Image (spheres, rainbow, N blue to C red):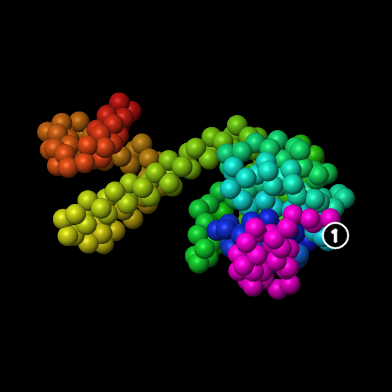
Amino acid sequence: MKLKIAILGAGNLAWNLAPALEDAGHELTEVYARDIRKAEEITERVYNAVPKDDLDFSESKAELFILAIKDDALAEVADQVILPEGSILVHTSGAMPMEVLAQSSANYIGVFYPLQSFTKGKKVDFEEVPFLLESEDEGTLQRLKKVAKSLSPLVHTLRHKEREAVHVAAVFASNFTNHMLRIAEEILHRQGLDRELLKPLIIESISKSLQLGAKKAQTGPAIREDYETLEAHHHFLGYNEQLAEIYRLISQDIIDS
């Protein structure tokens, strides 16, 4: 089933999703952004979509409207957008409930959440991206499944609580892990050392964790309860009390686990 689709939003997800949907055979009709230039950045990546900076979609030919915007703007945009009869409106958030769209003019609402980190300029292989879907209407859910399966074989139906658990876990696995890598880079930079020194270790650690499971793959002074090394590291980080406290808290959590 190939659909006519409009995307509301022109950020990292829209930059990746718009051409992927078109490559899967769907027709992109419009891309909305408050700044028309940002919408044009996306429409330039697809064949025939029109950039828009207003929320009147009453004359749109689209059947599916995808809100690819920040969580705190969902309710406001959903309330303001004017949609054609029979339309489906979905958001792409892992954290927000489907009901945030309940006051919209859409006939049907749902969730179309791709579980991946997106960045403009870095193409994502959607065949490796899980899609987490939700809708109270079975017909809508089936249509969302067909769109998702045109992009990826990894399609799941989850309720809000389950999706929220996945989103929190993803923050730990992705965002927090990346932040730890940033801290590691800064520690090396402070000593005039190249971050490339850690690259083989990072690759091996992630690979081993995925292969064995994180609990079995855990190594380091905390899991060994090597308090002498832990104290030395804590002392080394004395130049930054907050960093030293992060080290202490995470080390203690590893010991306690």
Q: Secondary structure at mark 1?
A: loop
The C terminus - image quarter: top left
Looking at the image, which is closer to me, 108 or 253? 108
Nearer the observer, 27 or 238: 238
Total tally of numbered discs in the picture: 1
Snapshot quadrant of residue 234 = top left
| Residue 220 is covered by the magenta coloring | no
Farthest residue toward the right?
85
Is residue 225 found left or right of 73 in the rendered image? Answer: left
**Residue 245, x across and y down, in percent:** 25, 34
Residue at image position (27%, 50%) is 184
Q: Position of residue 214 (x, y in %)?
A: 38, 40
Above or below — where is 12 with respect to 136? Answer: below
Magenta part of the chain:
30-58
Q: Quadrant of residue 126?
A: bottom right
Q: Residue drawn 59% across and 44% down?
A: 71
42 in the magenta segment: yes
Amino acid type of disc 1?
Glu
Q: Residue furthest top?
A: 256
Which of 140/246 is in front?
A: 246
From the viewer's perspective, is 210 left or right of 250? right
Quick check: 196 above or below 133? below
Between 83 and 55, the one lying in front of the other is 55
Residue that mark 1 sits on:
59
Task: Indicate the quadrant containing the N terminus: top left, top right, bottom left or bottom right.
Answer: bottom right
Query: Horizontal and vertical percent for residue 15?
Result: 59, 63
Q: Report the residue at 61% width, 38% height from top.
A: 96
Tell me if residue 138 comes above or below residue 1 in the rendering.
above
Please tell me which residue is depicted at 33% across the width and 42% down the height of the picture. Answer: 217
Choose top left, top right, bottom left or bottom right for residue 160: top right
Residue 106 picture location, percent across and down: 80, 45
Q: On the picture, is 255 further left or further right than 98?
A: left
